[in-house]
Amino acid sequence: MTIKLSLEALEVIDAIARKGSFAAAAESLYKVPSALTYTVRKLEEDLGVNLFNRSGHRATLTEAGAELLNEGRNLLSAASELESRVKRVASGVETDLTIAVSDLFDITIIYPVLDRFYAQKFGTRIKVLREVFGGSWDALISGRADISLGAAGDPPSGGGYTTKAIGTIEFYYAVAPHHPLASLPEPLQNVDIMRYRAVSAADTSRNLPPRTSGILSGQDVLTVPDMKAKLDAQIAGLGVGYLPRKLAEKHAECGELIIKRVAEPKPVAATFLAWCSKGGKAQQWLIKELQQLNFNDVLL
């Protein structure tokens, strides 16, 4: 099938419609009116339709012409964006960047950074993912993300990425006030804990082996989408488990949870900012800004 439309022809029709005459359109495009007349007549012949009503003094579009222009402007806009994106790639600026944010962090921490990023006029499209447990590492290793914020635990083996430790997360064991474990003496023993259902946030890893934490062998498990859902489930008494210290303390202060000491506490977890080593100018700008954040203030 031969394409009869061209971007040049669409630009001509757009100019005529905006300026109201072939002469004014030709001036705006730095062409002679006869060149525009030829372009329009050639397109009308190729399509077998009249695009302009030439009965009056002003060039007006026919119904078919209006439809062509309406859709044609979308094509012109897309072509312009494509041209800009190609130029950005050639200059070392990424067309797209994806940031994976751990569910242990308040996602709004990056919004002020993104606001400043857009002010730089990179033209890069940003996508933000929410990842759980090993999913923060998996997103980076698999290429689903270019930057991973708050990835917890030991980095996976392999190369191609850079890491910076940004802090540690301490976990407290928390139960609802009406849960049977709330009244047991401390420290809670594993033999008592395993009698009751644990709540676990589902690891979002697709390629790396899923990670679990704080689950005893043989213990019943309620799996929920993320840390916020895990918190809500534990407040509801559907199960028990570890929560980030700040989150557990906040809800213990208002009486929704009780923090319990356990015989075998969960170790403190290191968290990282990690990124693909071969990033372009837009990613480099983001990494520099993200490293300035105080991550301890935005842990859940």
Image (cartoon, helix red, strand yellow):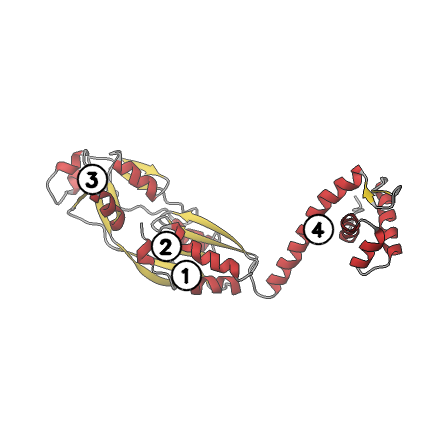
Crowding around mark 3 (Cα neighbors within 10 Å: few <14, some 14 to 19, many 20+) is few
Judge from the rendering whether residue 216 lies leftward or rightward of residue 95; answer left or right: left
Q: Give the foreground label among 3 and 2.
A: 3
Instruction: Give how far across and how far down residue 147 sits, in percent.
Output: 45, 57
Q: Are marks 3 and 1 in contact (CB under 8 Å)?
A: no
Q: Earlier in the sequence, mark 3 or mark 1?
A: 3
Crowding around mark 2 (Cα neighbors within 10 Å: few <14, some 14 to 19, many 20+) is many
Q: CA distance from mark 4 to mark 3?
A: 59 Å
Residue hosting label 2: 151
Q: Earlier in the sequence, mark 3 or mark 2?
A: 2
Crowding around mark 4 (Cα neighbors within 10 Å: few <14, some 14 to 19, many 20+) is some
Can residue 221 be seen from the camera position used here?
A: yes
Residue hosting label 1: 290
Question: What secondary structure is marked by label 1?
Answer: helix
Question: What secondary structure is marked by label 4?
Answer: helix
Query: Disc 3 residue type?
Result: Gly
Q: CA distance from mark 1 to mark 2?
A: 14 Å
Query: Disc 1 residue type?
Result: Leu
Instruction: Give how far across and how far down residue 37 sits, in percent.
Output: 87, 51
